[in-house]
Image: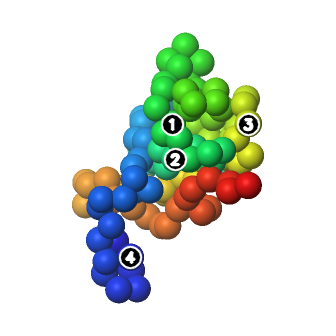
């Protein structure tokens, strides 16, 4: 929801999230501050050309975009590991409030891709 006017944009693909739970001990310090009991949220929009980040490489604990093979490390602020993506996936910081997972702050950077 847009905090300035209350507009709900639930139909936008820019609201698509990747939620995952990882061992907190494996998270880099910056990433740990954005997690709630090891649960992380990242945009599902690749920062390269806006395709969906739709693959999980379980053996390496890596997120991947099938369109152009960009890979992101969710343990380290979703930084780019490989491929043409120019920047990390924006994170949506989370917290636990009264036993419920909630959004703690806005996305860490602009959601979307680089338009050339």
Q: Against 11, is 77 above or below?
A: above
Residue at mark 3: 84
Would you say 114 lies left or right of 26 here?
right
Task: Report the Cα–Cα distance between label 3 and label 1.
Answer: 13 Å
Which comes sooner in the sequence, label 1 or label 2?
Answer: 2
Residue at mark 1: 53
Residue at mark 2: 45
Task: Report the Cα–Cα distance between label 4 and label 3.
Answer: 31 Å
Residue lying at 64% horizontally and 30% vertically, measured from the top left = 68
Spot occupied by residue 77 in the image (x, y as percentages of width and height): 63, 45
Residue lying at 42% horizontally and 35% vertically, measured from the top left = 21
Residue at mark 4: 2
Neighbor class of circle 2 (other Cα within 10 Å; few <14, some 14-19, many 20+) is many
Spot occupied by residue 24 in the image (x, y as percentages of width and height): 52, 36
Spot occupied by residue 79 in the image (x, y as percentages of width and height): 69, 41
Secondary structure of residue under mark 4? loop
Neighbor class of circle 4 (other Cα within 10 Å; few <14, some 14-19, many 20+) is few
Which comes sooner in the sequence, label 4 or label 1?
Answer: 4
Secondary structure of residue under mark 3? loop
Which comes sooner in the sequence, label 4 or label 3?
Answer: 4
Neighbor class of circle 1 (other Cα within 10 Å; few <14, some 14-19, many 20+) is many
Mark 2 or mark 4, whichever is nearer to me: 2
Q: How is the image coloured?
A: rainbow
Mark 4 or mark 3, whichever is nearer to me: 3
């Amino acid at each position: 929801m847009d905090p300035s006017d209350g507009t709900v944009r639930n139909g936008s693909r820019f609201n698509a999230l990747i939620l995952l739970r990882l061992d907190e001990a494996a998270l880099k310090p910056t990433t740990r501050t954005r997690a709630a009991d090891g649960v992380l949220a990242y945009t599902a929009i690749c920062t390269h050309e806006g395709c969906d980040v739709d693959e999980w490489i379980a053996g390496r604990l890596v997120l991947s975009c099938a369109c152009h093979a960009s890979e992101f490390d969710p343990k380290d602020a979703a930084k780019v590991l490989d491929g043409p993506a120019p920047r990390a996936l924006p994170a949506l910081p989370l917290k636990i409030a009264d036993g419920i997972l909630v959004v703690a702050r806005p996305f860490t950077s602009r959601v979307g891709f680089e338009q050339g």
